[in-house]
Amino acid sequence: MTIKVSIDVRKQLVTQKISDKLQLGEMLNAFENMYMSSDFNSDMAILVDIQPGSTSLITGDEAHKLVTLMRQYAGIRGRGKSAIIAPDASDFGMSHAIQFLLKDELREVRVFDNENDAKHWLGL
């Protein structure tokens, strides 16, 4: 499996770890499963770690599909922040594009090039 999702209720943290080249269907399933999980609550922080994986297989059209899904769930998102770790330049660019497209719906989304800065911003 390319994306592993873990929900830590005690830390109020969802971690999505991408370990290989990610395809859209897998990413959509991961987001839907996270939002539908009985352990998830809308105030949890979300940490998406793209290292050592890659979003290089996701096309621009597919990124728009992902944004559409995230917009559907934006209304149930509480105060939780979302941080994306994208050390690779192309992943960083794709993540920033998604962040820009969601700026009105999800204001608390940031993209980082390293884990320490992302965790610090999330308050971990």
Image (tube, helix red, strand yellow):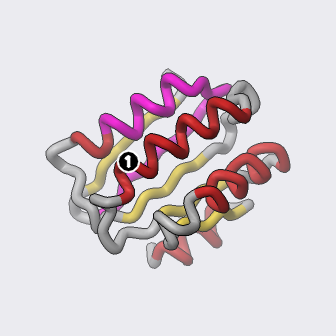
Give the residues in magenta: 11-33
**Residue at 51% across, 72% down:** 107
Question: Can residue 121 be seen at all in this image of the molecule?
Answer: yes
- Quarter of the rendering occupied by the C terminus: bottom left
In this rendering, position of residue 60 left or right of residue 116: right
Q: Is residue 54 left or right of residue 2?
A: right
* 27 drawn magenta: yes
**For the point 84% across and 49% down, which residue is it?**
89
Q: Looking at this view, name the residue that lies furthest to the left.
A: 38
Q: Nearer the viewer, residue 12 or 93?
A: 93
Residue 94 percent coordinates (x, y): 73, 47
Quadrant for residue 64, please give it: top right
Q: Nearer the viewer, residue 119 or 60?
A: 60
69 up-or-down from 24: above or below: below
24 lies above or below 11? above
Q: Position of residue 106 (x, y in %)?
A: 48, 65
Comparing 94 with 71, the one in front is: 71
Query: Circle 1 is placed at which residue position?
Result: 72
Figure check: 53 above or below 76: above
* Residue 11 seen in render: no
Quarter-wise, where is residue 83 in the image?
bottom right
Identity of the residue drawn at 46% across and 32% down: 28
x%, y% of residue 111?
Answer: 66, 62
Splitting the image into 4 quarters, where does residue 103 fall? bottom right
Which residue type carries mark 1?
Answer: Gln
Identified at 38% across, 48% down, the residue is 72
